[in-house]
Amino acid sequence: MTRRNALSVVSHLSAISLALLTLLPACVEEQKINVAASLDPKKMATMTTRNISTLISDSGVIQYKIVAPIWKVYDEANPPYWIFPDGLYLQKYDPYFHVVATVAADSARYFKDRQLWRLEGHVEMTKVPKDLFLSERLFWDQRKGRIYSDTFIHIETETHVLEGIGFESNERLTSYRVLKPQGIFPVPEDSASRNN
């Protein structure tokens, strides 16, 4: 065999090998990956919104304003809920659109079916004119019109400071009680008059 014929045979073998290599993947059975099977809709947010500022109305009357960096809605979860993992600021309005109360919390969760809010972290509520409520965890049951806590509560009004464990109130914060009071401290009159 001449050198030219040997090169020609090697060239043909290389071409055949290359053709076989390109056809080989076509012979392999295709495997389908079912991405949807690994997803659980009950554990996934159906909506994620960033940097929200929204007004909530009832019967055409604006009731609340919610401001939050992140709002995630889990409508497929059982029970369905909303979560505000990076904090929440809420304003409550009277019928004339005056702010009558505010709520701020490090995180919040709203259980839609029960109309129940769970506020956690540094929770601060204010009520006009100057009442301040501080706690680590508060619950707001909108269905029953009730606010309560099972943790430490600090309350400041124009006349006194009240501290204790556990708290119950109507949602307007006009009738409340501390379940295990730890101290009631009157606010000196000169201190109250300086704040006016």
Image: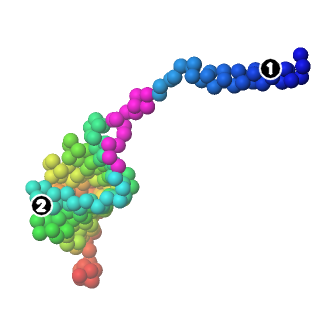
Mark 1, other Cα within 10 Å: few <14 / some 14–19 / many ≥20: few
Residue type (three-letter) at the residue carrying disc 2:
Val
Q: Residue at x 61, y 22 (%)?
A: 23
| Above or below: residue 179 compared with residue 40 | below
Of 184 and 158, which appears nearest the observer?
A: 158
Circle 2 residue: 61
Q: Position of residue 8 (x, y in %)?
A: 81, 23
- Lower position in the chain sequence, tag 1 or tag 2: 1
Number of the front mark, 1 or 2: 1
Label 2: state its secondary structure: strand
Q: Position of residue 81 (x, y in %)?
A: 28, 44
Q: Position of residue 68 (x, y in %)?
A: 33, 58
What's the magenta region? 34-48
Mark 2, other Cα within 10 Å: few <14 / some 14–19 / many ≥20: few
Q: Is residue 40 visible?
A: yes
Q: Residue at x 36, y 56 (%)?
A: 50
Of 155 and 45, which appears nearest the observer?
A: 45
Q: Which picture quadrant has residue 188?
A: bottom left
| Above or below: residue 138 compared with residue 24 | below
Q: Which picture quadrant has residue 51?
A: bottom left
Q: Residue at x 13, y 55 (%)?
A: 58
Residue type (three-letter) at the residue carrying disc 1:
Val
Residue lying at the far right of the rendered structure: 2
Circle 1 residue: 9
Q: Residue at x 89, y 22 (%)?
A: 3
Of 138 and 46, which appears nearest the observer?
A: 46
| Above or below: residue 160 compared with residue 135 | below
